[in-house]
Amino acid sequence: MISQHEVLDTLRMIEHENLDIRTITMGITLTQCIHEDADEVARRVYDRICAKAGRLVQVGREIEAEYGIPIVNKRISVTPISIIGAAAGPKGCLAIAKAMDRAARDVGVNFIGGYTALVHKGIAYGDQAVIDTIPEALDITELVCASVNVATTRAGINMDAVARMGRVILETARRTAARDSIGAAKLVVFANAVEDNPFMAGAFHGAGEADCAVNVGVSGPGVVKCALEKVRGQSFDDVAETIKRTAFRITRVGQLVAREASRRLDVPFGIVDLSLAPTPAMGDSVAHILTEMGLESVGGPGSTAALALLNDAVKKGGVMASSHVGGLSGAFIPVSEDAGMIDAARAGVLTLEKLEAMTAVCSVGLDMIAVPGDTPAETLSAIIADEAAIGVINGKTTAVRIIPAQGKGVGDEVSFGGLLGEAPVMRVSAVGCGDFIRRGGRIPAPLHSMRN
C-alpha cells in the first residue's frame, strides 16, 4: 500500500526535481506479417502496429492526468526488420520502413524502433537488406530508428559488420546533411544489445519477448542530484546509500505507471528500465550528479570512478523496488542530451578518449557524439570496434551513436531540437586505422564467454 508520505515525496520530485517517466514503449511482434511481396508485408506491418498501439498515446495521457506524473514520450518497438523483411528483400525493407513511419504518425507516438539487424556472428540475407537500406530508410522517414548489433560476449566481434557500419553511418549522415546529419542520430551500433530496451534509438522487440509488452523507461537525474545535495561532504558510503534509496523511490513510480498502462492496454507488463536519462534542460543532468560528488567538471580525473559508483547504486536501488527491472538500467552519458556534458565538451574538458573510458562503467556507451564530417569511415568503424571490445570483455551492453556532421569541424555545433538536443563537434584522432579495419573476420569471444 502506498503511504501518504510516499505520495507527497513523489509530488515533490515531480514538481521540483524533474522526475518523469521518460517513455512508455510498447513492444510488438511482427512475425505474422512476413510475406514475400513488398507491398503486402508493408500493409500487414502498418495494420498490426495500428491495431496494437492505437490506444497507447491516449492511455499515456490518461495516466498523466490522473496521477500527475509526466510521461514525456510514447514509443513503439517492433521485431527486428531483418527477420520480417527477409522474404521481400531490400525493396520490402524500405516499404516496411515507410509503413512503420506512417503507423507511428497515425497512432501519435514520438519514435518507432526496430529497423534492426542482429549480425554479431554473421550477416544473413535479411540482415544485409536492412543494413544496405539504413541510409535511405532514415532519410525518407522521420520517426523510424535503426540499430545493428555487431558483437556479443558469447560470439565475439563481427569485424566485417563493424567495417560496414562505419560506411553506413557516414552515408546516413551525408543523406541527411541538410538537417545536421540527423539520420545518424537515429542509428545506434550495439554490442550485447538487449531485447527489452524501451529507449531510442536502440529499441527493438526481441525474439524472446511476448507477443506484445509494455516497457517503461524512468528517469530522474535531478532527483538524484537534489538528494546528494543533502549529504555534501559526507563519505562515499553515504553517497552510495543515498543514491540507492533515491533510485528505489524512482523505480516505484515507474512500476506504478507500467502496471497501470499494462492493465488499461490489456498488454503484459515487461520491465521498468531505471536509466538516469538526461535532457538538455537545466537540473536534469547526469554530469551535474558527478560534480555534486565533488568533481570540478565531468571529464576530469575521478569522473570514471564517480560514474561507476552512480551506475552501481542506481541498479542496486532499482532491483529492490521491482522484480522486473531490465532494459539498460543505469546512467546514460549522451553528450547532446545533457547540459553538463555539453558544457564540459565545449570547454574541452570532456574528450572522446575520456568518454570511452567512462563507457566501461556506464549503461550504454558513446552516445550522441558529434564529430567532424570528414572523419573517415574506417575511423568510425575503429571507434565502434573499441566500444564493442569494452562490452564484450566486460559482459555488458555498449553502443555507439556517432554523428559525422557534414560540412562541420571541431568547435562547430549541431542542433536537433527536442530531447536530441545540441552538441559541439568533438575532436577525433587523425591516426590511421584503415589497415586494421580492412582485416575483416571476427575477433574471437573471450575465454570467460564459455559458461555452459
Image (tube, helix red, strand yellow):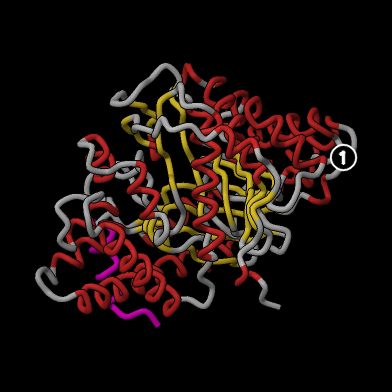
238 to 414, vertically: above or below: below
| Closer to the camera in the image, 426 or 129 | 426
**Location of the N terminus (image quadrant):** bottom left
Q: Is residue 284 magenta?
A: no
Q: Residue at x 39, y 76 (%)?
A: 316
State the residue in front, 451 or 202: 451
Q: Quadrant of residue 415?
A: top left
Q: Quarter of the image for the C terminus: give it.
A: bottom right
Picture residue at 65% right of the left edge, 25% below the top = 136
Question: Where is 50 relative to 257, above or below?
Answer: above
Q: Position of residue 262 (x, y in %)?
A: 58, 64
**Position of 46 compared to 260: left or right?**
right
Q: Is residue 14 magenta?
A: yes
Boundaries of the magenta span: 1-16
Q: Which amino acid does the dot numbered 1 rest on? A: Ala
Task: Quickly name the residue at label 1.
Answer: 87
Chief secondary structure of the magenta portion: helix
Where does residue 32 sit, x and y in percent of width and height?
Answer: 83, 50
Residue extending furthest right? 36
